[in-house]
Amino acid sequence: MIRTICVVLLWVYSSLSCAAGAGGPALLDANINLSNKVSLQRGARLFVNYCLSCHSAEYMRYSRMAADLELSEDAVKSNMMFTTEKIGETMRVAMAPEDAAKWMGAIPPDLSVIARAKGADYIFSFLNGFYSDSSRSTGVNNVYYPGTAMPHILWELQGEQELASESDDEHGGHGPALHPVSAGTMSVSEYQNATRDLVAFMVYVGEPAKLVRYRIGFWVITFLLILLLATYLLKREYWKDVH
């Protein structure tokens, strides 16, 4: 009886959670490809240039990243290591925690497992969801995380956007409409591809072993298919005299 009550309560809670989340804007499709090493390399470059100044990734070592993404250690040392000189060190931020709390009001979170916690679609939507908001101290807000304290660090690439009024919503109420106000150094498609690369890298950082599993999984499936064929032929050989 108690077990049944617990199951019912969990079902009610999950239903209420889904109903509460249904009122928010629909997430964009990140559509990342972890098998694309070039995309991961571009994402790593964006991460160290734009994210690593405030956010760390303390569970990822530069040496592991170099090996997995097929980058030379010299290239990583020359272009990606700004806070340490040792290739075996983790991706730490140069800013001291007490300074971060003083300047920003809170310590920026470590991004090692943010993709596993939030999901690729959410991060991709967040990076594409900034719009100008003069009421905010940072000058921007985000449709997917209203009231965010994070500034739009990629604004030079994307440019500035504004939130459409209800009457101007081209999505028919199915999602927020953002209109460009000023152009950035990238076009809309170029910026989306860049943030897609960045999200792909963050997904990789959250679970580096996934690349290994993908590589091993291909050969495991191939072996199982060959084994299936051999087993079928062996079965036919054993049963041919029975029939």
Image (cartoon, rainbow, N blue to C red):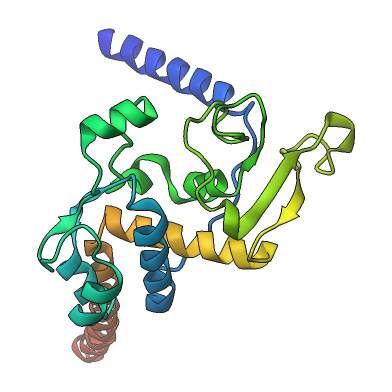
Q: Nearer the viewer, residue 172 or 47?
A: 47
Q: How many marks?
A: 0
- The picture quadrant where one finds residue 138 is top right
Q: Residue at x 21, y 57 (%)?
A: 83
- Left or right of residue 141, residue 209 in this image: left
Q: Nearer the viewer, residue 211 or 41?
A: 41
- The picture quadrant where one finds residue 9 is top left
Q: Measured from the top left, where is residue 215 in percent x and y?
A: 26, 76
Q: Measured from the top left, where is residue 140 in percent x and y?
A: 61, 36
Above or below for 15 versus 183: above
Q: Residue at x 43, y 46 (%)?
A: 119
Above or below for 200 versus 175: below
| Residue 46 seen from this side | yes
Q: Measured from the top left, where is residue 112 in percent x and y?
A: 27, 49
- Left or right of residue 118, residue 229 in this image: left
Q: Measured from the top left, where is residue 4 in percent x and y?
A: 33, 13
Quadrant holding the N terminus: top left
Above or below for 103 versus 178: above
Q: Nearer the viewer, residue 235 or 98?
A: 98
| Residue 31 seen from this side | no
- For this orientation, the residue located farthest to the right is 167
- Left or right of residue 88, residue 74 in this image: right
Q: Residue at x 23, y 65 (%)?
A: 81
Quadrant holding the C terminus: bottom left
Q: Residue at x 55, y 27 (%)?
A: 137
